Amino acid sequence: MTSLLIIVVLVLLGIAIWQLTKIFDLTQVGANRTDDGDSEVANDRDNNVNGYLMFGFLGFIYVFTIYSLWKWGGLVLGTPASEHGPQYDNLMAISMWLIFITQTITQFLLHYFSFKYRGEKGKVAFYYADNDKLEFIWTIIPVIVLAGLILYGLYAWTNIMFIDEEKEDSILVEVYAKQFSWEVRYAGEDGVLGKANVRYIEGVNTLGVDMSDPNAQDDIQASELHLPKGKQVIFKFRSQDVLHSAYFPHFRAQMNVVPGMVTEFAFVPTVTTDEMRQDGKIMKKVAHINEIRSKKSAELVAEGKTALDPYTFDYLLLCNKICGMSHYNMQMKVVVEDDADFKKWLSGKEKLSAAVKKAKDEAAAAAAPASEAAPSKPADSAAAKTDSTTVAQVEKK
């Protein structure tokens, strides 16, 4: 990587030196002007060639844009799986159409006028001082368009980021990020998550939950994220180490996960995993992916290696910040299911308090035989009578 960087720097340095020599040559044009073909001053032929090349580049822009839409247009995510998803997609569609129309018109005008008013021998440029009417038009149109887009964007943002804490049957979930994995914690029947701090991380308590907090006694820890369809899910995000970003692409949701603070957002899932697997666009994508995997598997088998498993669609929680060497592998399966199935899954999970107690009991049981097997030593009478607490108190006096 360092060698590549050095090569790039050297190439850029060479280009810079070459450009400087060209600039120097241009500064000498007036002193050494000739009418032969080696002159650096553009003539009518040069201007005509450049004018037509600009039209050619304009055509390239349009053709490449159309090709990109045809070739990669199907890679968009498709059906949104959250309540706010359609509004988010609508805002994106409006923005992209505005950019597309503006780019098409302005690029045409830019290249057309560059060609029409290209340099010609004997032609003098006309100095146009100003026109208040034109300046007003090309100023007010962008102001109106951008103001409308910004206001609609703020309206959409407010709706998406609003969390109704009083909404009935809301599910409270903590998403905990660390290099390079995710863990989740569900609030129990009390609907409140217990306090947590990285200093409490020990053994099975990998989230650092304060087990002395009464609200933590019914919390449930899991390595897979399950969500009920049609219910508001309130997410609380924490990071153990560096900056991460919780990205739910199909739910059109993302939130930075910042060390030392809790961030949050909420959304309502509207499409179960099974329903999304039956979506036409998703089925087409899955078929295309499996076609690619099938070809790759044939190559692997020919080399004596294990074939790839067929791909099955699942929602994913991804990290959208480059957080380290294994950032690409930081993902968690997300399952959206009916409320009854969700409650059944959650009821089958062990409470964190029970898991911590079980781990302590097992550790104590493993340590007990070792202490019993150790031979007892005659204790020194003076040492036996010494109370460390009392000694500490005496020292303080």
Image: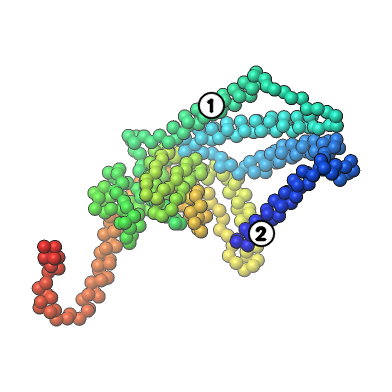
Q: Residue at x 21, y 76 (%)?
A: 372
Quarter of the figure that contains the C terminus: bottom left
Residue 218 position, x and y percent, is 28, 50
Q: Which quadrant holds residue 100? A: top right
Q: Residue at x 34, y 55 (%)?
A: 198
Is there a contact, CB below 8 Å, between mark 1 and mark 2? no
* Front in this rendered view, residue 373 or 161: 161
Residue 343 position, x and y percent, is 35, 46
Please indicate whether residue 76 sits to the left or right of residue 14 in the image.
left
Please indicate whether residue 88 sits to the left or right of residue 233 in the image.
right
Can you name the residue that lies furthest to the right here? 36
Residue 41 position, x and y percent, is 82, 40
Marked residue nearer the N-terminal end (1 or 2): 2
Q: Label for residue 7?
A: 2
Q: Residue at x 45, y 35 (%)?
A: 160
- Classify mark 1: residues with Cα within 10 Å, few (<14), some (14-19) or many (20+): few
* Front in this rendered view, residue 40 or 315: 40
Identify the element where label 2 is drawn. Answer: helix
Residue annotated with mark 1: 147
Does residue 389 appear in this view?
A: no
Please indicate whether residue 248 sits to the left or right of residue 367 in the image.
right
Quarter of the figure that contains the N terminus: bottom right
- Classify mark 2: residues with Cα within 10 Å, few (<14), some (14-19) or many (20+): few
